[in-house]
Image (cartoon, helix red, strand yellow):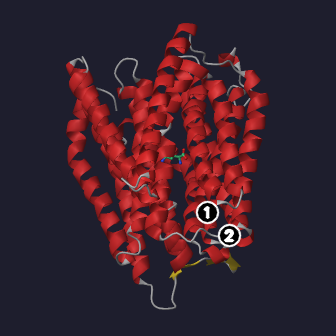
């Protein structure tokens, strides 16, 4: 029985399998992401795609935004058709194939590879977390610490990948770097294949499978139809499909999805007064999370460009590629997580409430951009910024993430009205999707204004929303109805 099993640091043995599956998946995701925007803007002569920053930022935002939005249908498909184990396995295979496509030096396989990674991550990411939850019986007190161990797996992959893939990609060959991401995911798939025999599948019932397969088929046909119509209009010169127009369309669809999801929930659901209030709280936390992630996720976009173009990337006499610097944030998170957990534990009930932790998260990420604005002001012709600025910025990001992300996840599960936990998780990932999309589009503004000005604006949005949220903490705590 899963609940008696204590073979992995006092946790069920299945947690080890899921830890390493997610570690390898995040290894491939962050290894490739560290290279992505730099590869797109690198001149063709040096093996890059030679895109301008507006186009590269639009594709970056579209890709990272859809990766997280795909978690919504990915969770649905697992719940109703495939089951979580099969979804994770298929997702892993698709991701590995996607990175293999990027390892080929062709533009068409580049786009197809991104599409495969989006579909694969949508299938894998939400369901590997669901499987972690399924290892524990309802009242098992080890559940939260199980998730903390799992979060360490995420960040272990995210720490190692930029160093290895970044170094090989930028110093040897971009495509070898992507190839390493593929190898990482393959390692994850193999160990999941063998390891997942230790725990049971979360299986949907036969009738649900048949009904849902029919629904999915209809959606796929509709989507394919829309793609064909758009393609035909493009061929006849009636619309122009470019990377930027697709990215713009995605932005509009994202806004519609957010408005429709919350509008539908708040105005058309049959809720008690308390449930409705809690949904209102979820909406405020969601908006705050969108602002947080849109600053935080610039690690892969504007901050990555700043590292490449304006930072002297040497430390202790070692000269390293810009992309490798991406290891600092997840690395700092691993080191700081026990410290923060200890502080929260010590403070107990007198510690900060959930909305207060959101205020802190926003404040830290806002501060980090004021730091970067100061860094940008030290630039002069021929003078690059010290790497210490970016290291400081990423450490502040790690503290911010530790304040906001874990409590955000658990608040979604605690505030969700009856049976809607899965949907609330999907909404949580949607905030990351919005944030990633905005962070990509901001890279388009990178050349359009002084960098110090861009970073100051981002910092002001962070601090401004922290202050706004500060005024809301009291009413929010009241509306949470006893949940801290
Ligand atoms: N760093 C975490 C992960 O990769 C959280 C990312 C996010 O939700 N923006 O899973």
Given residues 217 and 404, the one toward you in this image is 217
Q: Quadrant of residue 152?
A: top right
Q: Please, is residue 474 above or below residue 482 in the view?
A: below
Query: Secondary structure under badge 2?
Result: helix
Residue 407 visible at all: no
Left or right: residue 427 versus residue 189 is left
Given residues 30 and 398, the one toward you in this image is 30
Residue 146 is situated, as x and y percent measured from the top left of the image, at 60, 32
Q: Please, is residue 408 above or below residue 416 in the view?
A: below
Q: Which residue is at a point 68% across and 51% down the rendered structure image?
A: 101
Distance from the alpha carbon under mark 1 to that under mark 2 = 8 Å
Residue linked to disc 2: 170
Q: How many marks?
A: 2
Q: Please, is residue 253 above or below residue 178 in the view?
A: above
Query: Secondary structure under badge 1?
Result: helix
Residue linked to disc 1: 35
Residue, far bottom: 381
Q: Are marks 1 and 2 in contact (CB under 8 Å)?
A: yes
Q: Which mark is residue 414?
A: none
Mark 2 neighbour class, 10 Å CA radius: few under 14, some 14 to 19, many 20 or more: many
Residue, far front: 236
Left or right: residue 474 versus residue 438 is left
Residue 8 is situated, as x and y percent measured from the top left of the image, at 72, 31
Quarter placement of the C terminus: top left
Q: Say which label, 1 or 2, has the lower sequence index.
A: 1
Residue 163 visible at all: yes
Q: Which residue is at a point 57% across and 30% down the rendered structure image?
A: 127
Residue 13 is situated, as x and y percent measured from the top left of the image, at 73, 27
Residue 118 is situated, as x and y percent measured from the top left of the image, at 56, 43
């Amino acid at each position: 029985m899963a609940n008696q099993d204590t073979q992995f640091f006092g946790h069920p043995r299945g947690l080890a399998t899921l830890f390493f599956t997610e570690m390898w998946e995040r290894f491939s995701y962050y290894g490739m992401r560290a290279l992505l925007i730099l590869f797109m803007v690198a001149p063709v002569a040096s093996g890059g795609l030679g895109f301008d920053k507006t186009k590269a930022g639009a594709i970056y935002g579209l890709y990272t935004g859809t990766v997280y939005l795909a978690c919504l249908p990915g969770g649905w498909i697992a719940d109703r058709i495939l089951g979580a184990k099969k979804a994770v396995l298929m997702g892993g295979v698709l991701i590995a194939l996607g990175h293999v496509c990027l390892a080929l030096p062709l533009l068409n396989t580049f786009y197809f590879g991104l599409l495969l990674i989006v579909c694969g991550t949508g299938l894998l990411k939400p369901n590997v977390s669901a499987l972690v939850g399924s290892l524990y019986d309802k009242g098992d007190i080890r559940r939260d610490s199980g998730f903390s161990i799992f979060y360490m797996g995420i960040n272990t992959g995210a720490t190692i990948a930029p160093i290895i893939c970044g170094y090989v990609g930028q110093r040897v060959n971009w495509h070898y770097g992507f190839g390493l991401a593929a190898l990482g995911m393959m390692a994850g798939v193999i160990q999941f294949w063998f390891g997942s025999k230790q725990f049971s599948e979360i299986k949907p019932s036969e009738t649900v499978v048949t009904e849902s397969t029919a629904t999915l088929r209809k959606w796929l046909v509709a989507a394919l139809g829309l793609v064909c119509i758009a393609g035909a209009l493009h061929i006849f010169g009636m619309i122009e499909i470019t990377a930027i127009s697709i990215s713009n369309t995605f932005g509009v669809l994202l806004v519609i999805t957010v408005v429709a999801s919350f509008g539908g929930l708040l105005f058309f659901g049959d809720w008690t007064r308390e449930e409705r209030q809690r949904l209102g709280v979820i909406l405020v936390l969601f908006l705050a999370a969108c602002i947080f992630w849109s600053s935080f996720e610039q690690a892969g976009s504007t901050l990555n460009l700043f590292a490449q173009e304006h930072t002297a990337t040497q430390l202790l006499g070692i000269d390293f590629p810009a992309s490798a610097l991406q290891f600092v944030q997840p690395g700092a998170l691993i080191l700081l997580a026990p410290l923060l957990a200890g502080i929260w534990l010590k403070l107990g009930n007198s510690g900060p409430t959930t909305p207060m932790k959101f205020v802190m998260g926003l404040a830290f990420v806002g501060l980090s951009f004021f730091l970067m604005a100061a860094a940008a002001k030290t630039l002069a012709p021929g003078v690059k910024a010290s790497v210490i600025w970016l290291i400081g910025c990423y450490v502040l990001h790690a503290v911010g993430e530790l304040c906001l992300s874990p409590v955000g996840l658990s608040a979604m599960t605690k505030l969700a009205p009856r049976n809607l936990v899965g949907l609330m998780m999907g909404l949580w990932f949607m905030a990351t999707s919005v944030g990633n999309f905005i962070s990509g589009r901001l890279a388009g503004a990178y050349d359009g204004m002084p960098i110090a000005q861009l970073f100051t604006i981002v910092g002001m949005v962070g601090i401004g929303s922290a202050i706004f949220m500060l005024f809301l903490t009291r009413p929010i705590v009241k509306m949470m109805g006893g949940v801290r």
